[in-house]
Amino acid sequence: MRRALVSVTDKTGVVEFCKGLIECGFEIISTGGTKKVLDDNGVKTIGISEVTGFPEILDGRVKTLHPNVHGGLLAVRESESHQKELNDNHIEYIDLVCVNLYAFKKTIEKGCSFSEAIENIDIGGPSMLRSAAKNHKYVTVVSDINDYETVLNEIKENGDTTYETRLKLAAKVYTLTAEYDTMIATYMREKAGLPEKLFIEADLKQNLRYGENPHQSAKFYKFSENVPYSLASAKQLQGKELSYNNIQDANAALNIVREFDDVPFAVGLKHMNPCGAAIGKDLKEAWLKAYESDPVSIYGGIVATNQIIDKEAADLIKFDHGQKDKSIFLELILAPGFTEEALKAFSKRPNLRVIQFEMGEYSNQKQYVSVNGGLLVQEQDTSCVTVTEEMTITNCKPTEAQLSDMNFGWKIVKHVKSNAIVVVKDGVTCGVGAGQMNRVGAAKIAIEEAHSRGVFEGMTLASDAFFPFSDTLEYASLNGVVAVVQPGGSKHDQDSIDLANEKGIPMTFTGMRHFKH
């Protein structure tokens, strides 16, 4: 009779699984708490001590670490010498192992003492899994409760699992034990004061057609944890597959949207920089303002909002200013939700990518950037101070409207490639100067763009970093800028302060820089 060894921490479905194995002619060997659950539910079991001839000892630390277990798992069935050694030592084959591991991660995440963490390091479980996985030619190894049904169905239909299934199950085991050991190693190295070692675990989400350019191969991986404002956790509702550049742009857009959770907001984005952004009394107003701020650059870009998109808003986004004879070409639309009517409207453009993402409280995560031969890791820039009148460093104080624009501009410029200057008016971007080698150049681009849109006065300027000299402010003051928000911190700050006082321009220092390389 074939034998299955079952010892699980997560007992979901284990009773039904074992009953199914018995119907297929298996004996069930079990241990500790698993045996009790099975016995209590009328599943006949053989205690592990009956197999090993040795009691479970040391508070369960030693149960399955025995030749009668691992010999039965590791024997090569065609080997005469292996068969003889099993017979000489009265060891029987074990044909199936069903094991999942002590919940080490959950234990340390909920908070525990060091001794509690140590007791939740599984020893026997990984050993059995690895032995069975190594000998997958003969042994079926089940480490995931989601595989119970597949295994039972194959045994019922074929008398055994297929080799292809056993190979997949073995690969899953080595993945599980690698992840498990990584968690323990990370925890123990920290406790021991050893130098930090970075382990990265991610699942392949999508093979991409190519990377930034057609000659570059690319893939999209997802970390195991779902987080809000994440494209990796988002749901694509229609459209072509996402490209590498789509993913980069969408991620940048979500980071901007994350700044606005208390007012309707829309942003158009191109090459990871906002080309138009606005707040409004509702989504329709926010979108029209964002679009009108730069209707040229939005072509071929993406749109993101923090509002559910209804049909009326969908029709505005689909068409140039709502004119149904002139359409806007967009790559992608991101929103926390869509009405059925909106989705029906977008479905008339089947290639348009429509993505629904989750909003919510955002926990700071790490940001990874590869460099030749290494990896840069930093915390994501999730901080953004609220600009207040108390931050004013000039004699002239900002009005309430200027403070509002300072806060709006400050949240936008944070997400523009450095050197970055953004000019805004009435909660709308008028011009964006991105990625320039000097700050005056960025200011000129932003302000000239505003002038080209017919905005010549009343603008608030936001700078991602301090003014090294007063030349940026000099140019801005002559070209319609009436208020400024910047981090401050230059040894020449006083030059800019003096000039702002001379021009009657209120200027605030946030004390926080937002370089974005």
Image (cartoon, rainbow, N blue to C red):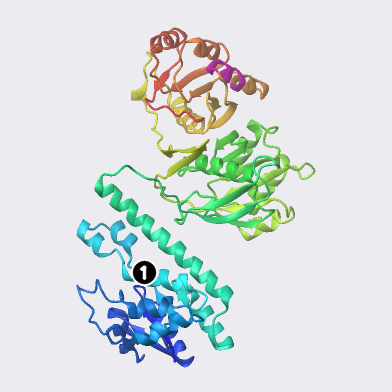
Q: How many numbered discs sit on the rendered protein?
A: 1
**Residue 192, x across and y down, in percent:** 25, 48
Horizontal side, residue 476 vs residue 237: left or right:
left
SS at badge 1? helix
**Residue 355, x across and y down, in percent:** 60, 53
**Residue 353, x across and y down, in percent:** 66, 51
**Residue 230, x across and y down, in percent:** 51, 50
Name the foreground residue: 156 vs 354.
Answer: 156
Look at the image and say whether residue 441 sits in the magenta stretch.
yes
Neighbour tally class for label 1: few under 14, some 14-19, many 20 plus, Cα within 10 Å: some
> Can residue 174 be seen at all in this image of the molecule?
yes
Residue shown at the point (50%, 41%) measured from the top left: 255
Horizontal side, residue 44 vs residue 233: left or right:
left
Residue shown at the point (20%, 73%) measured from the top left: 59
> Can residue 95 be seen at all in this image of the molecule?
no
Horizontal side, residue 217 vs residue 443: left or right:
right
Name the foreground residue: 472 vs 101.
Answer: 101
User: Mark 1 belongs to which amino acid?
Assistant: Ser
Look at the image and say whether residue 69 sits in the magenta stretch.
no
Above-or-below relation of 173 to 162: above
Tell me the quarter of the picture where residue 38 sits. Answer: bottom left
**First to last magenta residue range:** 438-446
Quadrant location of the N terminus in the rendered image: bottom left
Residue shown at the point (56%, 45%) measured from the top left: 305
Query: Label 1: which residue?
Result: 127
Name the foreground residue: 321 vs 177.
Answer: 177
